[in-house]
Image (cartoon, rainbow, N blue to C red):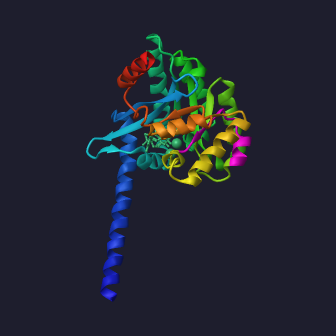
Amino acid sequence: AKTVSRNQFQFYVASVDSEMRERKQMEKDLHQALLNNEFHIVFQPQIDYKNHTIIGAEVLLRWVHPTRGFIPPDIFIPIAEDNGSIVGIGNWVLDQACKQAAIWQKKGHCIKLAINLSAVQLRDTTIDKHIKDTLAKHHIEPQYLEVEITETGVMEDVSKAISTLNSIKDHGVSTAIDDFGTGYSSLSYLKKLPIDKVKIDKQFVHDLLIDEDDTSIVNAVIQLSKSLHLKVIAEGVETEEQEAYLVSRGCDMGQGYFYSRPVPADEFLTYLLAYDKK
Ligand code: C2E
Ligand code: CA
Ligand code: CA
Ligand code: CA
């Protein structure tokens, strides 16, 4: 028994060690990734349930590593947040999003883009000015930009987050709270934070019609958002049945694979043109 446990211990040490090494390597690679042009952005449509139109798109970051290939953002974003490279990367996403919005606007398609703002970016005192300057650089009106933040992102310093979000909103950029329901004191934050929109987390939408608890949570979030005069969007909508239920409950908007996966800019435009004709 002793040898077994020692072997297990050694195995554990070895795997933690290699995990550490892998993480260190990824930290280094992240710093290079921007310079090496390894990132790109994709777009996922957001559907307005009232008029059945595309009201905008969420911008999502993609990293194709030169040797490891596609690395999911859920893996590399937390590391980029830890080593601070998320600030440069996040600024790049904002710039690319505005650049794309300008290209589409020239073609006559005014699309509102929602970008994910990391808690680390939100703590940067120049973020509001940076957003304003980037919009101006690309001649994009602020009403065509939205920032998505998570509750966990604002927990650390709530009053600071409130003032930063307020100045972002003062520029005319709208705000959304992401992954709603997954964090801690959701309810108190909803009241305190200057936000326009609530995004119901996809984990509640997934089993919406199967799990009664999820049904209750989704119903409650829609009701609550309405009472607080906030727009509410469901993410992770994958089926017609989910959409029908959300519409019946008065959910304002939806986003998910049922409409489209996140796709590159040219594919998004094709989708948009086809959708308009429906
Ligand atoms: P998120 O902001 O909650 O983004 C929604 C995630 O759900 C995306 O995953 C999207 O591809 C996925 N999704 C959309 N529709 C469906 C659906 O119908 N079913 C399922 N199962 N999933 C769906 P993705 O692109 O892998 O991004 C994961 C997370 O990484 C994002 O979660 C966000 O927290 C973060 N992230 C992505 N891009 C950025 C970025 O530019 N900046 C920052 N700070 N974070 C980002
Ligand atoms: Ca998001
Ligand atoms: Ca989310
Ligand atoms: Ca998430």
- Please state which of residues 29 and 247 is positioned toward the viewer in this rendering: 247
**Left or right of 101: which side holds 20?**
left
230 up-or-down from 187: above or below: above
Q: Position of residue 251 (x, y in %)?
A: 60, 35
Magenta residues span 187-201
**Left or right of 277: which side holds 46?**
right
Residue at 41% across / 34% down in the picture? Answer: 262
20 up-or-down from 271: above or below: below
Residue at 66% across / 32% down in the picture? Answer: 196
Q: Is residue 181 visible?
A: no
**Residue 173 magenta:** no
- Please state which of residues 109 and 167 is positioned toward the viewer in this rendering: 109
Q: Residue furthest bottom?
A: 1
- Please state which of residues 59 and 17 is positioned toward the viewer in this rendering: 59
259 up-or-down from 31: above or below: above
Q: Position of residue 226 (x, y in %)?
A: 69, 36
Q: Which image quarter holds the C terminus?
A: top left
Q: Which image quarter holds the N terminus?
A: bottom left
**Residue 195 magenta:** yes
Q: Residue furthest left?
A: 67
Q: Is residue 176 visible?
A: yes
212 up-or-down from 99: above or below: below
Residue at 46% across / 45% down in the picture? Answer: 77
How many marks on residues? 0
Q: Position of residue 8 (x, y in %)?
A: 33, 77
Q: Position of residue 149 (x, y in %)?
A: 58, 40
